[in-house]
Amino acid sequence: MPKGFPLEQCHAVITGASSGLGAEFARQLAPGAEVLVLVARRADALEAVKMELSGTRTKVLCCVSDLATEAGRSDLIAFLGAHEVRPNLLINNAGLGDYGSFASSSAEKTRTQIELNITALTMLTHAVLPLLQTPGGIVNVSSLASTLPMPELAVYAASKAYVTSFSEALAIELAPKGITVSCVCPGPTPTNFSKTAKRADGGDTNRDGQGLLRIPPSQVVGEALGALRAGRACVFPGVGVAIAGRVFRLMPRGLLRWVLRRRASKV
Ligand SMILES: NC(=O)c1ccc[n+]([C@@H]2O[C@H](COP(=O)([O-])OP(=O)(O)OC[C@H]3O[C@@H](n4cnc5c(N)ncnc54)[C@H](OP(=O)(O)O)[C@@H]3O)[C@@H](O)[C@H]2O)c1
């Protein structure tokens, strides 16, 4: 059983590395990493992150790819082969939300959420596993939302429940092979997430109580990497989020639905 993944001299693939938590994973790994492969759709934003890291001795490669498509996922695997990258760390971070009711959601955005949050995370893990050097590590970015059925964010919360469950199972399956899997469940974190999750009509989510849970991306990523290093299967970064995660997971489902119904009726 691995006792955790040593981060030094890692060869890491980071999805969604053009902003927010993904860019922060790159910043925190860069001082000790050998190779970082940054993946996202926006080439200019990826290059900006690469520029930021130019003071380190890490080799940084940018792979422009739409991971919500099968072609984009295949391109990433081909990119790793073409550049002879032998990863020992995969950070499945790319993800997206959608604020508003399910009935009024666009079918296209709903499909993209499922493709990115669930299919890409699963199939990339499947494709990278045969390439993963050991000792190896996988970080899957889930959410505090994975512990709740969330009205007005229903598909997102359900997709993250999948990520947490999948990750905890993989952590057990892969431990004997020398691969540490850690799932990180952040609460509300200031990134581009809300901007992307908002709909064209400007509808927003209910932010009551979020101030108590909000912590900066640097803390979220620091705790995620600490969990990977320590071999912890699941981490809820920040004291408030850790308590909320524990409470939501222990609450009877009927009571949880009652609380969520009351909250929804206030909007
Ligand atoms: N911020 C929060 O409050 C919060 C809370 C809990 C969990 N999370 C999770 O944290 C992860 C990172 O999100 P974030 O908060 O850092 O938001 P963000 O700043 O919007 O970052 C999302 C990243 O995903 C990339 N991405 C989006 N669609 C993609 C696609 N089709 N193919 C490839 N890359 C794609 C984006 O890059 P491009 O646009 O360049 O493609 C960007 O780099 C997500 O999984 C999110 O669910 C966030």
Image (cartoon, rainbow, N blue to C red):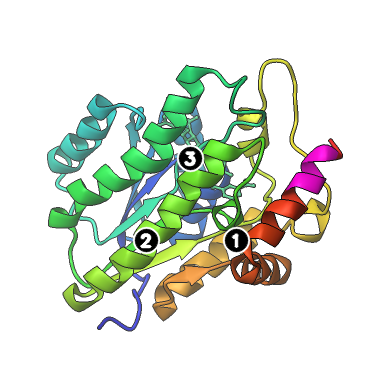
User: Which percent across, then down, holds residue 181?
Assistant: 34, 67
Which residue, given by chain and number where applicable, does mark 1 sit on? 220
Residue drawn at x 22%, y 30% as measured from the top left: 75
| Residue bearing the label numbered 3 | 95
- Is any atom of residue 144 visible in this view? yes
Q: Which residues are magenta?
A: 261-265
Find numbered disc 2 in the image and state the secondary structure of the residue it sits on. helix
State left or right for residue 38 relative to residue 244. left
Q: Is residue 147 magenta?
A: no
Residue at position x 60%, y 61% in the image: 220
Label 3 within 8 A of ligand 1 by Cβ: yes
- Nearest-to-viewer mark from 3 and 1: 3
Picture quadrant of residue 256: bottom right
Residue type at numbered disc 1: Val
Secondary structure of the residue carrying numbered label 1: helix
Q: Amino acid at mark 3?
A: Gly
Q: Nearer the viewer, residue 198 or 165?
A: 165
Q: Nearer the viewer, mark 3 or mark 2?
A: 2
On residue 167, the disc is 2
SS for callout 3: loop
Residue 167, position as x, y percentages in the image: 37, 61
